[in-house]
Amino acid sequence: MIYAYKCERCGESFTVEATLAEKARGLKVVCPRCESRDVAQDFSGVGLMRGPGADGPSGCCGPGSGAGCC
């Protein structure tokens, strides 16, 4: 999964790629700009990672599914 964060110190918005297991174990997130650990997760920026072959070569739902990219 891809998680979006915002640094409370410098205001930098950034993403972190982690598994659900890593997140459950208490993922330690550090701002890439100022190296602060004072970060807050932005829940509007959560996404799923899908690899090639998941539903087609690009990881998107196939034609006719009515969903476009998942």
Image (spheres, rainbow, N blue to C red):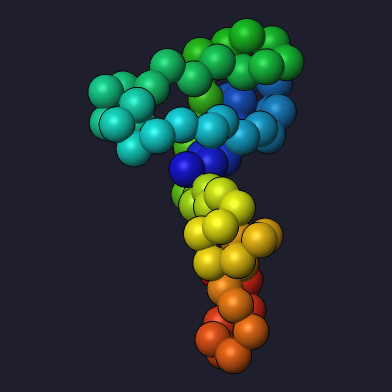
- Along the line of sight, the residue nearer the viewer: 63 or 44: 63
Q: Residue at x 58, y 11 (%)?
A: 36
Describe residue 62's horizontal placement relative to residue 18 as left or right: right
Residue at (47% x, 43% y) in the render? 1
Could one spot residue 47 in this view of the protein? Answer: no
Q: Which image quadrant for residue 65?
A: bottom right
The front one of 47 and 64 is: 64
Q: Position of residue 27 (x, y in %)?
A: 38, 22
Front-most of 62 and 23?
Answer: 62
**Image coordinates for residue 52, horizontal then vertical, percent:** 60, 53
57 over 4 or under it: above or below: below
Residue 20 placement (x, y as % from top left): 34, 37
The answer to whether residue 33 is left or right of residue 37 is right
| Quadrant of the drawing holding the C terminus | bottom right
Residue occupying the point 51% across, 40% down: 3
Question: Which residue is rendered at x = 35% and y = 31% of the image?
Answer: 23
Q: Position of residue 66 (x, y in %)?
A: 56, 89
Total label count?
A: 0
Q: Vertical placement of 4 versus 34: above or below?
A: below
- Name the outermost residue toward the top: 35
Tell me if residue 60 comes above or below residue 48 in the rendering.
below
Residue 70 visible: yes
Left or right? Give the position of 29 relative to 32: left
